[in-house]
Image (spheres, helix red, strand yellow):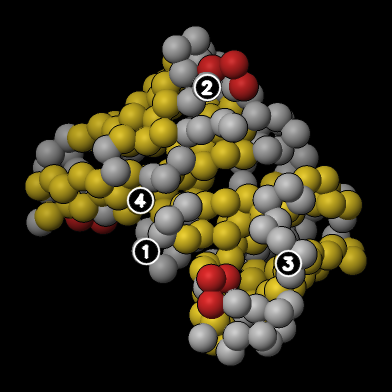
Amino acid sequence: DAGVIQSPRHEVTEMGQEVTLRCKPISGHDYLFWYRQTMMRGLELLIYFNNNVPIDDSGMPEDRFSAKMPNASFSTLKIQPSEPRDSAVYFCASGPSLHTGELFFGEGSRLTVL
Amino acid sequence: ILNVEQSPQSLHVQEGDSTNFTCSFPSSNFYALHWYRWETAKSPEALFVMTLNGDEKKKGRISATLNTKEGYSYLYIKGSQPEDSATYLCALHTGGFKTIFGAGTRLFVKA
């Protein structure tokens, strides 16, 4: 398996533009997570899905952020409109349906909003 | 609010030194404790998953212990090598797949 695949790896955009980050989880994993990493707050959980259904989105910072998982092999995280404070590395991770909760991370999408 | 604390924040050691760092967590919300190794410009990779009080896990020169009653885990690296330089993340799994990460300990090993 290729692991968790994220795209784009890097994105530079201007304030106000829409940003869409994409993730392909490991095949067979029932859980998918979106994390944001910043210097100030470390790794923050934004939202996670189980069997394509959003379970906990309490970490989504505000209405400008939305996430979808239309099928078991694809998820998107959208920011509209983007702001400079959204600049961060966004990680997608997936996990098997086991009790230990181990996560497998993608390589991240580095977002810079000018 | 659940908080996972790691110390120290960063550590500079010489090649060959042994080192250890600490993760503390609220013991009342324990389901599993994870250690991840995170190299710069890469993604975090799982080192250990620990579930039972008194667990000890080992992978080569790296080992970890767990005390769920008092809410702490130690990670040890014996004979540090430059390739051990990375950020070591501790994460508390509270069940329902809610995983809370500590801020990490950044290890620098000088040759």
State the separation of the CA atoms marked 1 and 2: 29 Å
* Disc 3 secondary structure class: strand
Mark 1, residue position:
B40
Q: How many marks?
A: 4
Q: What kind of residue is marked 4?
A: Thr
Q: Position of residue A21 (x, y in %)?
A: 68, 75
Q: Is residue B8 above or below residue B14?
A: above
State the separation of the CA atoms marked 4 and 1: 8 Å
Residue B64 occupies quadrant: top left
Mark 4, residue position:
B87
Mark 2, residue position:
B26
Q: Badge 1: how crowded within 10 Å, few (<14), some, or many (20+)?
A: few
| Mark nearer the viewer, 2 or 4 | 2
Q: Are marks 4 and 1 on the same chain?
A: yes
First-in-chain label (1 vs 2): 2
Q: Are marks 3 and 1 on the same chain?
A: no
Mark 3, residue position:
A65
Q: Position of residue A93 (x, y in %)?
A: 64, 56
State the separation of the CA atoms marked 3 and 1: 27 Å
Q: Position of residue A27 (x, y in %)?
A: 77, 58
Residue B6 occupies quadrant: top left
Please name the residue shown 54% across and 17% down the image: B27
Q: What kind of residue is marked 2?
A: Pro
